Image (spheres, rainbow, N blue to C red):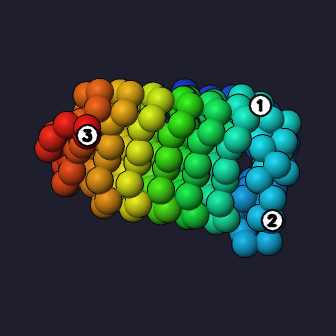
Amino acid sequence: MKLASFQNKDYKPGANPLKRLVWFALNAIVFNSYFFPLYNIKVKLLQLFGSKVGKGVVIKPKVKIKFPWRLTIGNDVWIGEGVWIDNLADIIIEDNVCISQGALLLTGNHDYKKNSFDLITKPIHIKSEVWIGAKSTVCPGVICEKGSVLSVGSVITQRMSEDYIYQGVPAIKKRLRY
């Protein structure tokens, strides 16, 4: 790798620099803190910055959200303490999803095959009734089908089948959920 040759010129974060700056400050003060436990304020701020957010959304303290304008959250979603939504690309979270504490939703990576270490981004889609376990990671491009479960501390790099439990690093299909 030749990191000095890295360029990010083709990546478009989707908002002007002032909006990004204001968001980073609000994210640090309101979301990535213990001082604002009120879920309704967090939901309104996300909507103000371009997120589509449903009803009954719970966002615990110490959550980091990179770009709210690239985030869609359905109804009755729980986002646990310390979750990091690193959404350089779009993330869709459907209804009745639980993202447990310390989980990481990661939409960006680098091309290790190129000396310039180019940025690669891919969206994440988490369908209804999915449970992302504590301290687990959802990698770029993953689709979590309805009712799937990612066990504690696991890393998913592939599409998750409907109603299956995945576990391990990398996560593999273990058994049916029901």
The percent coordinates of residue 84 (x first, y second) are 54, 54
Instruction: Using the rendered image of the protein, determine whether residue 136 is visible from the camera's viewpoint.
Output: yes
Task: Nearest to the eye among marks 2 and 3: give it.
Answer: 3
The residue singled out by tag 3 in the image is 177
Task: Give the position of the C terminus as an image quadrant.
Answer: top left
43 vs 76, left or right, is right
Task: Nearest to the eye among marks 1 and 2: give it.
Answer: 2
The percent coordinates of residue 53 (x first, y second) are 71, 33
The residue singled out by tag 1 in the image is 50
Q: Which mark is residue 92?
A: none
87 vs 23, left or right, is left
Of callouts 1 and 2, the N-terminal one: 2
- At a point 73% along the width and 72% down the height, the residue shown is 34
The percent coordinates of residue 100 (x first, y second) are 47, 56
Q: Which mark is residue 36?
A: 2
Q: Amino acid at mark 2?
A: Phe
Q: Amino acid at mark 3?
A: Arg
Of callouts 1 and 3, the N-terminal one: 1
Check if mark 1's residue and mark 3's residue have beta carbons within 8 Å. Answer: no
- At a point 47% along the width and 29% down the height, the residue shown is 128
Secondary structure at numbered mark 1: loop
The percent coordinates of residue 121 (x first, y second) are 45, 32
146 vs 45, left or right, is left
